Amino acid sequence: MRRIYMMIVLFAMMFLSSSTKSWGQDIVNLRHIVQCGETIETLADKYRLTTDILKTVNLGMDTFYTGLEVFIPVDSKYLCLRSEDDSEIILEDIAGYFSEYQEASRIFDSGNYKKADKLFKFTIQNHGKYLPCEEAYFGKAMCDYNRKKWSSAIEGFTQVISIKECPKELKELSRGLRAKAEEQREARSQRTANFLSGLFQAAAEVGTAYMAASQANAGQAGYGYPSMPQGKSLGSMSNAEFTNYVNTSLAQLANYSVMQVEQQWKQEEIQVKTGFASSYRQLNGREPSAEEVQAAYDNYMQTKVNAYKTAQQVSSGLYDRELGISGNSSTDSKKKTASGFVCSVCRDTHVCQTCNGSGWQSGMGDIHDHYGAGINKIPCANCSNGRSKGDGVCHFCK
């Protein structure tokens, strides 16, 4: 009987040492020599198993002691490029992968996605040569997803899907998340395009007139549009390429407009302040204070703002509506508008309506005579250069 029992045990061990189909996976039982301090519980935790599974593959033994040879069941995918003869090396690699992946997952669950991303990368670098690491790749993609790095997340989920050994359920989950990431990336691209378009429009409205004048005076070549991608035409571009080309064009034009306007504003500020200081010295025999100079410039700019608002009203037909006249203004400056005049601002008098043709306007409460035109008088913001009396001609119809 004892001999028969030993033969049964030997047969069972030979059977368990071979590849078997269990739990829906290809399972391989790898030999392991129990080390000092290892127990059935610690080994189960180390290799993400249960103690019942370890008992089953080891003939019901529930006590592991140092030096005992036991079997550790693992998924055959972990044997990629290696054989069962390297069982201890493979088991060590698997245990290291599980431990590092578990730590990265813990950091991920805490919400520190940036650090978790580094740990998932580290895990893949350490074990990606022989192990599929699909869980770590998925974890890394989820870090990018939660950090709204949509392009990187899409690449990460695509990587998970491409792993042959990846479970079907994880592939399906990755496909769903990849689709959501693609939607978010498209929405962000649209928001970016809208923002740049708005930036371009705002900059162009303020700077177009100055750009045209400065280029004409200085002989500048003007704005250079970005070149088309090599071998591409607008019709042959993908949506992403076309969006990138348009956004680049808008950004460059907006930056050009803003720089030109900033330069003009700075130059104009210097001219206004210098002109005010010169007139002030002649009239008062002393230098104006910094506060007086700034107040004069602020008054000048406020007047320009008011004039700009008037121009916007004229272009939109608001002036005609305020005059009680219906109809749309003509875009042809040589034709009469709905108000019955070629110029709705001066009503064809050709006189500046800000200063009423005098070239001077109110200084908004200033009690000094800075320019020799009388108290509380400054150069007209519409028909002057900001330093001296204006020409009194309508700024809109010239």
Image (cartoon, grey):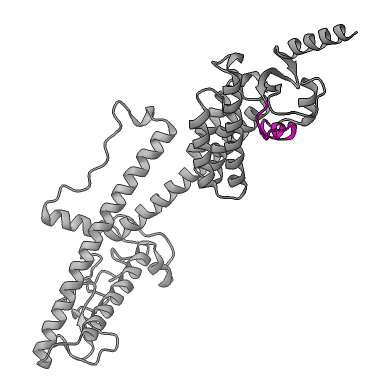
Give the residue displayed 37% in from the left and 67% down from the top: 313
The residue closer to the viewer here, 32 or 351, is 32
In this rendering, the count of numbered labels is 0
The quarter of the picture where residue 381 lies is bottom left
Q: In this view, does 79 lie above or below 337?
A: above
Quadrant assignment for the N terminus: top right
Q: Going by the image, does 27 lie left or right of 344?
A: right
- Percent x, y of residue 115: 51, 46
Q: Quick check: can you spot residue 185? A: no
Q: Going by the image, does 170 lie left or right of 338?
A: right
Give the residue displayed 22% in from the left and 44% down from the top: 224
Write the start and end of the magenta stretch as one range.
Answer: 34-47
- Percent x, y of residue 335: 29, 57
Quadrant assignment for the C terminus: bottom left
The residue closer to the viewer here, 225 or 125, is 125
- Percent x, y of residue 183: 55, 39
The residue closer to the viewer here, 245 or 98, is 98
Q: Is residue 284 above or below residue 19?
A: below
- Percent x, y of residue 76: 64, 18
Question: Which residue is most to the right?
Answer: 1
Give the residue displayed 23% in from the left and 89% down from the top: 376
Q: Going by the image, does 171 lie left or right of 184?
A: right
Q: In this view, does 245 lie above or below 337?
A: above
Q: Going by the image, does 329 lie left or right of 230?
A: right
The quarter of the picture where residue 179 lies is top right
